[in-house]
Amino acid sequence: MIQWRRGVVAAVGRAWRGSLEIDVTAADGRMFRALAYPELVGRPEVGDEVLVSVAALELGLGTGGYALVVAIPSRLPEDAPLEGHMVKARYTPLQTVVDGAEERYPELANASSLDGMPVVVADLHSALPAVLAGIRAERPDARVAYVMTDGGALPLWFSRAVDGLRGAGWLTAGTVTVGQAFGGDLECVTVHSGLLAARHVLKADIAVVTQGPGNLGTGTEWGFSGVACGEAINAVAVLGGLPVAALRVSSGDARERHHGLSHHSLTAYGKVALARAEVALPDVDDVFWHGVASQTAELAARHTVVSVSVDGLDSALRSSPVKLSTMGRGLDQDYAAFLASACAGRLASVGGSQHYGMLHT
């Protein structure tokens, strides 16, 4: 449930696309960071009284250490023009009306094919910059679109990574938010229509599908928001695209179920994904990656496991315009995680194993 606090804006901090960071002094004298989405609540200024939600912050959950601004009671924003009638975050107090791409763009009325477009699917938002690094290592001029699902943050604005990647020209085609997620260049109802919008409206050569920042996990096999990766693989295949699966791998996670190949990849790709995908496996000759290859062999009956060269990917990853971080670990603390994602990007950038001539099983 919601835990409310009243406070006063003490300072205005960093701003990025769609988000504004502020310092708030609560009635009890406690100070904390809060995040406002100006398109929803207006732009807070020093001295404004704000209402904030603090439940996730109090629990230490993955909100980036923020309370979230719900309203500026004394200075409500003026009514914004209602250009569409698609509602997201539906039937919550902050439901927002967006202009749905399916109704705005006539080219989507009868669209039903991705025309073979490669689509990389990953379960964590932190994979996005590494996937893009792998794509750029082979096709720096490719038009890449990001399709954000609603398994993590609903506002795309929460992602500083997306803002940095766009500013650096790494997300050249644009962004699409699907399901209950919102804030993308295009708003769509489903992953299916979001992928079609990426292809036919944004004119993407390649798309990347992940949930937004954060995720919901329970430690159980099925209680993880990233299980939807398997459903995204199915959507890509149904629409005539090339599904490329990014493995979730870790050399730095202390939890046994995530060390090496995460059990979540085995669930999403091995049980939920019914369509055949190409699974990118880094071609590295050492004990760790041999172990990952053995774990990945479980997927070979259902998918094509492709051994992908890692040549040049280290420099590509280190050139990322945004910090690489997964579960609080940086590139050198969990190198395997980012290398696996970069290999998926490389595989997609060349159109899959048949075009690249890589060994596959």
Image: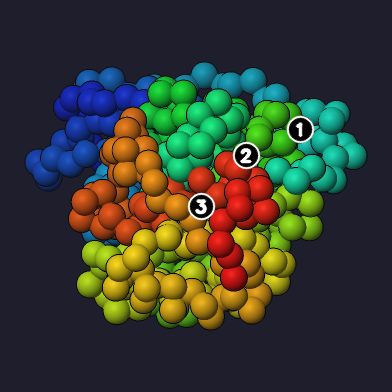
The x, y position of residue 311, in whole percent, is 39, 46
Q: Camera-side residue: 313 or 86?
A: 313
Report which residue position mark 1 lands on.
200
Q: Camera-side residue: 319 or 165?
A: 319
Q: Amino acid at mark 1?
A: His
Q: In the rendered image, is residue 345 in sight?
A: yes
**Structural distance between the alpha carbons of marks 1 and 3:** 23 Å
Q: Nearer the viewer, mark 1 or mark 3?
A: 3
Q: Along the polypeptide, which appears first: circle 1 or circle 3? A: 1
Find residue 206 and name its label.
Answer: 2
The kind of secondary structure element at disc 3 is: helix
The x, y position of residue 219, in whole percent, is 38, 77
Label 1: few (<14), some (14–19) or many (≥20) C-alpha neighbours in 10 Å:
some
In the image, taking residue 355 as reference, residue 256 lies left or right, namely left
Query: What residue appears at the point 42 percent right and 39 percent down from the top-left corner?
Result: 133
- Image height check: is 213 above or below 46? below
